[in-house]
Amino acid sequence: MNTLKNSANKEMNGGNEKFIGNEAAIMQQFEIIKGFFQTDSGSEMIGSLHAMIESFLFTENLSQVTPEMREHIVNQLRVATLVAKLESSYKGLKGG
């Protein structure tokens, strides 16, 4: 039974080994994210991205949307998803 317990502990601690020695880099990343959300909240940034995309999509000459423009739209939506995930992660780290 101890073998199973030791195996579980080794598995759980194995993930933490990646962070040992990287504390400074992790803190730097946290400070970057913290600074990023000091100006605007994630929901404000996402709203702005969506407003920009919507204004573009509802223009009269939508038939002239090129494949490159479609790629830009997809990238904007991916950025919105990233911002939402970063904000959620940041709020979890700072305690709400």
Image: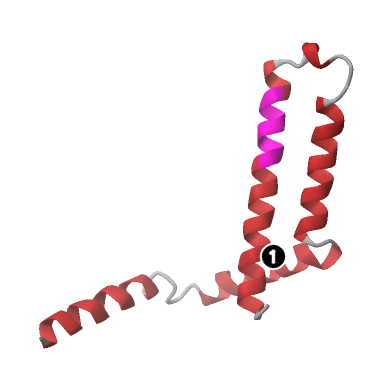
Residue 51, position as x, y percentages in the image: 84, 40
Element class at badge 1: helix
Magenta span: predominant SS is helix
Compare residues 80 and 38 and report the one nearer the observer: 80
Q: Give the residue at x 80% y 34%.
A: 53
- Above or below, 75 against 56 in this view is below
Q: Is residue 62 magenta?
A: no
Which residues lie in the magenta part? 70-77
Taking the image as shown, residue 80 lies to the left or right of residue 47, namely left
Compared to 67, does 14 lie above or below? Answer: below
Name the residue carrying label 1: 33
How far across and down, in percent of the image, does residue 60 sit?
Answer: 89, 16
Residue 5 image point, x, y percent: 19, 84
Q: Position of residue 71 (x, y in %)?
A: 66, 27
- The residue located at (36%, 74%) in the rendering is 17
How crowded pointer 1 is (Cα within 10 Å; few <14, some 14-19, many 20+) is rated as some
Q: Is residue 88 visible?
A: yes
Q: Quadrant of residue 52?
A: top right
Q: Quadrant of the N terminus?
A: bottom left
How many circles with numbers are drawn on the protein? 1
